[in-house]
Image (cartoon, rainbow, N blue to C red):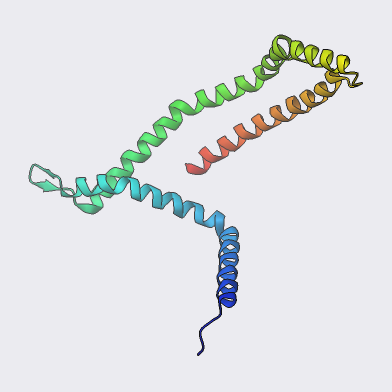
């Protein structure tokens, strides 16, 4: 069989790359738990190795016992952390959602209004007929409207992730 030309090699490599990426896109939801499990095994394996050879009096825990003990401890810490920190994080997110409009209004009056006035003065001196305040108000209103929706969506997604983990 004759050797493949450079063009053919590139075509095959490109096709395999595109095919591999398409495959990963199709199975990405299935792969996520496996990647998390792989990360957990990578992080917790040294502790399992250490516990499996550790002697307590005359007893050794063994590999299976060490795995069970490490995962029991890991999920206990994860569960307690979720129980203790979850409500606080959710409460802070809800407070942020409630207070964000007031923070933005305060920013608008103390920082943005003087800036707009100076920009408008510069535009007027240059003879440019543009209402900077009106244009910025439109942008500001759209940002304020979308940020509230994004914050609520983010909190709901965070809840779904925590529920999914448990």
Name the outermost residue toward the front. Answer: 126
x, y percent for residue 2: 51, 88
Of residues 71 and 143, the one nearer the viewer is 143
Quarter of the rendering containing residue 72? top left
Quarter of the rendering containing residue 76? top left
Report whether 106 appears left or right of 15: right
Report whether 59 appears left or right of 19: left
Of residues 163 and 110, the one nearer the viewer is 110
Looking at the image, residue 122 lies above or below residue 155? above
x, y percent for residue 70: 29, 43
Name the outermost residue toward the bottom. Answer: 1
Looking at the image, residue 26 lies above or below residue 134? below
Report whether 23 appears left or right of 48: right
x, y percent for residue 27: 56, 60
All told, the count of numbered labels is: 0
Quarter of the rendering containing residue 122? top right
Looking at the image, residue 54 lies above or below residue 139? below
Name the outermost residue toward the left. Answer: 58
């Amino acid at each position: 069989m004759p050797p493949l030309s450079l063009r053919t090699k590139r075509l095959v490599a490109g096709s395999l790359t595109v095919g591999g990426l398409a495959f990963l896109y199709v199975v990405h939801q299935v792969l996520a738990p496996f990647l998390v499990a792989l990360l957990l095994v990578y992080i917790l394996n040294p502790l399992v190795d250490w516990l499996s050879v550790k002697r307590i009096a005359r007893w050794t825990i063994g590999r299976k016992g060490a795995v069970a003990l490490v995962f029991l401890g890991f999920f206990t810490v994860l569960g307690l952390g979720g129980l203790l920190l979850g409500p606080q994080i959710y409460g802070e997110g809800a407070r942020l959602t409630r207070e964000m409009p007031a923070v933005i209004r305060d920013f608008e009056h103390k920082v943005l209004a003087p800036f707009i006035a100076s920009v408008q003065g510069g535009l007027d001196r240059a003879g440019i007929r543009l209402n900077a305040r009106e244009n910025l108000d439109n942008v500001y209103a759209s940002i304020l409207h979308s940020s509230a929706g994004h914050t609520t969506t983010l909190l709901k997604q965070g809840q779904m992730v925590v529920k999914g983990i448990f």
